Image (cartoon, grey):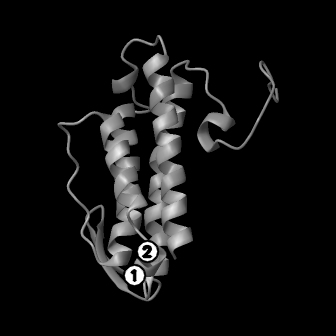
Amino acid sequence: MYQRAVQVALNGLTRAEHLARVAQTSEISGIWSATLADDMFPLETQLRIAVGFTLRACLPLVGESVPAPDESITLFQAVNNARKTLNALSPEMFAGAADRQIAHKAGFADVSQTGVEYLDQFAIPNMWFHLSAAYMILRSHGVAVGKADFDGVHGYPAGFSWV
């Protein structure tokens, strides 16, 4: 469970930090408050939620509570704090995590799942959902991002397009 949780969460943090740096260096006015739709969170909030889900994915599995988001710090500080917290976790701390019952809220729903269900069906998908929303906000507002910016794996030559 350590590999499934911490390594994926650390990757998510790296992707959130990268997308934030892309936004920071863009010349798009108001990009941090840009949304995909009026009833959706803006870019900065999407990234902060994704960062929060990296902790939400891991800490309940080791029996620790998730700290409340600290809105007084920058997004980059939140990434660094989350990275420190995740790096302090060890494989031994995840003993029994797959079967541990995790009671949590999903929106307004009260949910109870085993650790593996919680990680695979709730926490990690939500982290990627908010990272995807951030990527789509950047893309839809004219920021030059591609699949490599989202996942950090793909590589395409400059100017490449499938269409």
Task: Check the image and name the residue furthest to the left.
Answer: 72
Question: Mark on residue 113?
Answer: 1
Q: CB atoms at circles 1 and 2 under 8 Å apart?
A: yes
Q: Nearer the viewer, residue 68 or 139?
A: 68
Q: Secondary structure at mark 1?
A: strand
Q: Quick check: 33 left or right of 2?
A: left
Residue 47, located in which quarter of the rendered image? top left
Q: In x, y percent, where is residue 33? A: 33, 25
Q: Which residue occupies 35% across, 47% down?
A: 49
Q: In x, y percent, where is residue 41? A: 34, 38
Q: Quick check: 127 left or right of 69?
A: right
Q: In x, y percent, where is residue 28? A: 45, 13
- The amino acid marked with disc number 1 is Gln
Q: Residues within 10 Å of mark 2 (few under 14, many from 20)?
A: many
- The amino acid marked with disc number 2 is Tyr
Q: Which residue is mark 2?
A: 118
